[in-house]
Amino acid sequence: MARKRKGRLIDGIFLLNKPLDISSNQAMQKVKWAFGAAKAGHTGALDPLATGMLPVCLGEATKFSQFLLDTDKTYQVTAKLGIRTTTSDAAGEIVETKTVDVTAEQFAQACEQFRGPIKQVPSMFSALKHQGKPLYFYARQGIDIPREARSISIYALTIDRFADDEVDMTVHCSKGTYIRSLVDDIGQVLGCGAYVAKLHRSQVTDYPSDKMLTFEQLDVLVQQAKEQGLEVSEILDPLLLPMDTAVKCLDEVILSAEQVIYYNNGNSARLATGAALVTTVAGDQVRVYAPDSRLFLGVGVLEEGQRVQPKRVVVREAV
């Protein structure tokens, strides 16, 4: 006997403005509950002390969350100078305190060496895995694991406010960048130490920040639906972004009508006649669509001979 599905089938991406003092997983579960979704996943953890954009993938969109993990991000960060903590943020224990004698010009000069492609050693309080466990698991036991420096890129770093021992910055960076480590490194260059006092993620890829909603705003919409005698889905579902927005960095291809069924069954399929590719070559991943309806079918790998091999297939319930 088949198990009864818990939750409804709903596909799309919700932009949550995550509040303080809640983990990304807890936030994702609350969004899942609000939508009554059968399946959900988030796209890169924000610390409990961080706020801001957390794309939550619902349903089949979870198959494409990795693409959002790999995109660039933008953060607003407040750095507190003169103090180092165990975690390089406000949650850690103070391990060093120094007098702050830094000018705005000196701070700006220190930031210069962190712009562009750089190497960064991940924090011990990151979620990077070592022997199957995140680094913070070992850090909380006082165990230090050697970490190799990783290549990242700081596309832009602007100083928005300088006030003695407190500095506001906006950082646009590549995947894998740890803002706590960046601030700690800047503090070390200045010789006074620094930690992250506030952190807000304002953007993931080019998702619009004005589309983010808080839990309070979600609650208001749910209450409005009840007052108007509507299903909650009628109010909330239009808030979802299409799942293919997670993979818009990829070239798109269109299948011929008769080849759609082959693709949906996991078989190599032929592109529609005259399908044009911009920069893609065999071996690259592509967005795959059905003709006419522009229905998103998933992500495939382009093959020689104008064919595409399925990699992630969108499964839709039969109507």
Image (cartoon, rainbow, N blue to C red):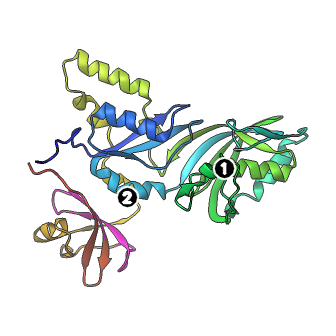
For the residue pair 204 and 208, the one nearer the viewer reads as 204
Query: Residue at the spot x=61%, y=55% of the render?
Result: 177
Q: Is residue 266 visible?
A: yes
Q: Name the quadrant containing residue 240.
A: top left
Identify which residue, 280 or 297, lies in the foreground: 297
| Disc 2 residue crowd, few under 14, some 14–19, many 20+, Cα 10 Å | few
> Helix, strand, or loop for circle 1?
helix
Q: Is residue 295 left or right of residue 191?
A: left
Residue 197 in percent (x, y) is at 69, 36
Q: Which residue is mark 2?
A: 248
When the figure is inspected, residue 257 is found, relative to residue 109, above or below; the finding is below
Q: From the image, tell me which residue sits under label 1.
A: 139
Give residue 291's position: percent from left, percent from top: 17, 63
In the drawing, does residue 182 fall left or right of residue 1? right
Amino acid, disc 1: Ala
User: Over which residues does the magenta segment extend?
Assistant: 278-300
Q: Is residue 305 above or below residue 170?
A: below
Mark 2 or mark 1: whose residue is earlier in sequence: 1
| Mark 2–mark 1 CB contact (< 8 Å) | no
Badge number at residue 73: none
Q: Residue at x 65, y 45 (%)?
A: 140
Task: Specify the quadrant of the image occupied by residue 251.
Answer: bottom left
Q: Amino acid at mark 2?
A: Lys
- Measured Cα–Cα span from mark 2 to mark 1: 37 Å
**Residue 30 magenta:** no
Q: In front: 161, or 69? A: 69
